[in-house]
Image (cartoon, rainbow, N blue to C red):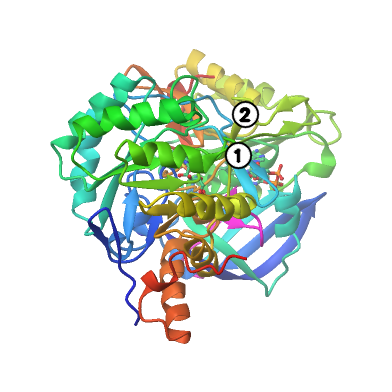
């Protein structure tokens, strides 16, 4: 496969929560090959490093990709200055391993924490009514994508830490309930590391396959510079895997937390 | 179309642009953007005798116009490199420079000996890695140790030997002269400058290794100065690097005395940087009626 890097036209930009923006970009060559779990590597103009952002929707027919990001520091602030009609510098699709899809799965649970929620949406699109989408946010002002999950037909469960919307508490509460109600074939998760660890442990205890999407600081994004390492177990050996190339999606059993 | 070819220690480069060690892996990844045969050469990831895991993450931090890295020489070890990566590199129709590193003089010697039996075109002796506890930069910061390790590796290899110098020294020209005297065929510079960032919200260094090597545009003026000083001090060719991102940067470094340039950090923002630099140098030469890139090497009219 070839990598693509270039400037692509932004078709739509929407502010969907406090400091969180939703972009749709026209990039037919990328949309044709992008897979759920992969990401785009975006260059804020003038910065030394690109910013990795998960793909939130792939529309191969329209030739578009969608992604959602929160302004955290200077680079995402610069990216958020771009508007519909502007061009954005993308290297994509990147991520050597996206989510492994099992077409035959009868029931899957998607667990998204905060800004880790967007990569769950392509999975909801694939699994539709077979999916339960559990999302957790700090407070109501940060809630995103709940209508999108519903539109895909997924059972949609919302949690906030302060109880300002949905269930008060962590995503693990409804996760355990849903597992008890009916054991899923796969749990997919993306979010802060403590959340992923807790989800992975619950999956392990219940002997359920669990795929997690990890974050690490990146340079090249394609596997050449080796800066994005994370500790993992492969073939019984401890290795420093690279999130951009060996991931960003890992089987939870491979991750050393 | 101007003549872009240069010659370093008897090795012919089709153009003077080489991706820098550690930023280009073993070529496979960027080979998915463009044919590697377009490049003047490739400097491989620093390779050691045994495989190494490298340091813990985070291994990268952004800085004003640059980055800090603390990879710590993660690599599969020389045997696996020779078995799995080198055959693929040798097919790419470009000059292959194998960057080697180690903790002890003996380790450098062993690695160089193993390469002697291969077709690799050149060896780049990395005595300037700031990210490992032992060896690495420790060899590069004094004239005696730099000379000693150059002499030791020189004895076991007939391949053209490039010694990669550290900028974390007071007199880089002195070190260049010391390695030249012991048989280095060329020097390359600069490796990264030791730096540090702290996250003031947590009070923790951004890098898990606390400190790391600074590269990118931020170091470019330092690279120009050091290349100029070294080129004026030695007779062997100088390969320049440190913050080169555009053809103008490459031309500037060549005017300072570099016979070729390496490009590293710039590729993270622009994977096509080396290709654009090659095209840009050609355009510059054509526009200025210069028939060969060799005419600009060391052409600075110093005051
Ligand atoms: C595979 C992957 C997918 C991601 N998907 C999304 C997403 O869909 N939406 C979203 O809002 N965020 C996502 N992130 C996190 C996002 O990349 C960071 O929030 C962003 O890079 C911060 O940049 P900044 O300029 O705002 O912050 P700064 O603090 O100025 O960034 C400084 C440097 O640190 C890096 N950095 C800082 N925080 C992170 C982090 N959490 N992960 C990786 N690098 C970081 C930056 O890329 C930059 O190189 C993802 C991260 C990864 C690795
Ligand atoms: C992520 C990273 C890894 C590096 N690894 C090596 C290495 O293994 N061996 C080496 O000699 N230099 C290594 N370097 C240094 C570069 O080869 C180069 O000397 C330096 O980055 C300056 O050039 P630049 O500003 O164009 O990146 C590394 C640099 C970076 C950014
Ligand atoms: S970011 Fe360069 S190897 Fe992952």
Q: Quadrant of the C terminus of chain A?
A: top right
Q: Image point 55% across, 46% down: which residue?
A: A124
Q: Is residue B29 shown to the viewer in this render?
A: yes
Q: How far across and how far down the image is residue B190, in percent? A: 50, 45
Question: Would you name the residue on which mark 2 appears?
Answer: B211
SS at mark 1?
A: strand
Give the alpha-carbon distance from disc 2 to disc 1, as whole Å: 8 Å
Question: Would you name the residue on which mark 1 appears?
Answer: B68
Viewer-proximal residue, B59 or B294? B294
SS at mark 2?
A: strand
Q: Is residue A77 magenta?
A: no
- Say above or below: A25 vs A168: below
Q: Image point 55% across, 69% down: which residue?
A: B301
Q: Image point 32% across, 44% down: which residue?
A: B26
Does mark 1 fall on the same chain as mark 2?
A: yes
Q: Is residue A159 left or right of residue A127?
A: right
Q: Which residues are magenta?
A: A42-63
Q: Is residue A52 magenta?
A: yes
Q: How far across and how far down the image is residue A4, in percent? A: 44, 62
Determine the image quadrant of residue A196: top right
Q: Is residue A67 left or right of residue A100?
A: right
Q: Are marks 2 and 1 in contact (CB under 8 Å)?
A: yes
In which chain is the residue bearing label 2?
B
In which chain is the residue bearing label 1?
B
- Say above or below: B13 vs B140: below
Q: How many marks?
A: 2
Determine the image quadrant of residue A102: top left
């Amino acid at each position: 496969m070839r990598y693509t890097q270039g400037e692509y036209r932004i078709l739509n930009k929407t502010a969907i929560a406090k400091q969180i923006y939703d972009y749709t970009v026209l990039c037919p060559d990328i949309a044709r090959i992008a897979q759920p779990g992969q990401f785009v590597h975006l260059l804020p103009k003038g910065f030394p490093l690109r910013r990795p952002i998960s793909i939130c929707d792939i529309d191969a027919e329209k030739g578009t990709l969608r992604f959602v990001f929160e302004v955290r520091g200077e680079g995402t602030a610069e990216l958020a200055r771009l508007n519909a009609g502007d061009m954005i510098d993308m290297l994509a699709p990147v991520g050597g391993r996206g989510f492994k899809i099992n077409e035959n799965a009868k029931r899957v649970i998607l667990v998204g924490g905060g800004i880790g929620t967007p990569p769950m949406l392509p999975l909801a699109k694939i699994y539709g009514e077979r999916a339960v989408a559990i999302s957790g946010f700090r407070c109501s002002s940060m809630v995103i994508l709940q209508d999108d999950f519903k539109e895909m037909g997924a059972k949609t469960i919302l949690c906030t830490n302060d109880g300002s919307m949905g269930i008060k508490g962590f995503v693990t509460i409804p996760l355990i309930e849903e597992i008890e109600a009916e054991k899923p074939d796969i749990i997919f998760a993306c979010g802060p590391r403590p959340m992923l660890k807790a989800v992975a442990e619950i999956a392990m205890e219940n002997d359920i396959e669990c795929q997690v999407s990890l974050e690490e600081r990146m340079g090249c994004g394609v596997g050449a510079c080796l800066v994005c390492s994370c500790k993992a177990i492969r073939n019984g050996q401890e290795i420093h895997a690279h999130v951009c190339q060996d991931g960003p999606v890992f089987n939870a059993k491979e991750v050393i937390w | 179309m101007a003549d872009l070819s240069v010659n370093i220690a008897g090795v012919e480069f089709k153009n003077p642009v080489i991706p820098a060690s550690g930023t280009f892996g073993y070529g496979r990844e960027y080979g998915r953007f463009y044919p590697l045969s377009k490049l003047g050469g490739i400097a491989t990831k620093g390779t050691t005798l045994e495989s190494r895991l490298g340091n813990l993450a985070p291994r990268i931090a952004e800085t004003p116009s640059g980055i800090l890295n603390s990879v710590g020489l993660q690599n599969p070890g020389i045997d696996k490199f020779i078995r799995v990566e080198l055959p693929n590199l040798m097919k790419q129709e470009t000059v292959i420079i194998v960057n080697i590193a180690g903790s002890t003089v003996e380790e450098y010697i062993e690695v160089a000996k193993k390469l002697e039996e291969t077709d690799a075109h050149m060896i780049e002796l990395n005595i300037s890695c700031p990210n490992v506890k032992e060896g690495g930069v420790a060899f590069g910061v004094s004239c005696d140790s730099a000379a000693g390790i150059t002499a030791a590796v020189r004895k076991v290899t007939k391949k053209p030997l490039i010694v990669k110098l550290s900028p974390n020294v007071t007199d880089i020209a002195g070190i260049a002269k010391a390695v030249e005297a012991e048989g280095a065929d060329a020097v390359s510079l600069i490796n990264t400058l030791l730096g540090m960032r702290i996250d003031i919200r947590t009070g923790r260094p951004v890098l898990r290794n606390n400190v790391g090597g600074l590269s990118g545009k931020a170091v470019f003026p330092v690279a120009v100065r050091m290349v100029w000083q070294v080129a004026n001090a030695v007779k062997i060719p100088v390969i320049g690097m440190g913050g080169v991102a555009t053809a103008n940067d490459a031309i500037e470094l060549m005017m300072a005395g570099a016979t070729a340039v390496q490009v590293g950090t710039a590729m993270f923002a622009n994977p096509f940087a080396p290709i654009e630099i090659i095209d840009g140098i050609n355009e510059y030469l054509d526009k200025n009626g210069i028939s060969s890139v060799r005419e600009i090497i060391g052409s600075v009219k110093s005051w």
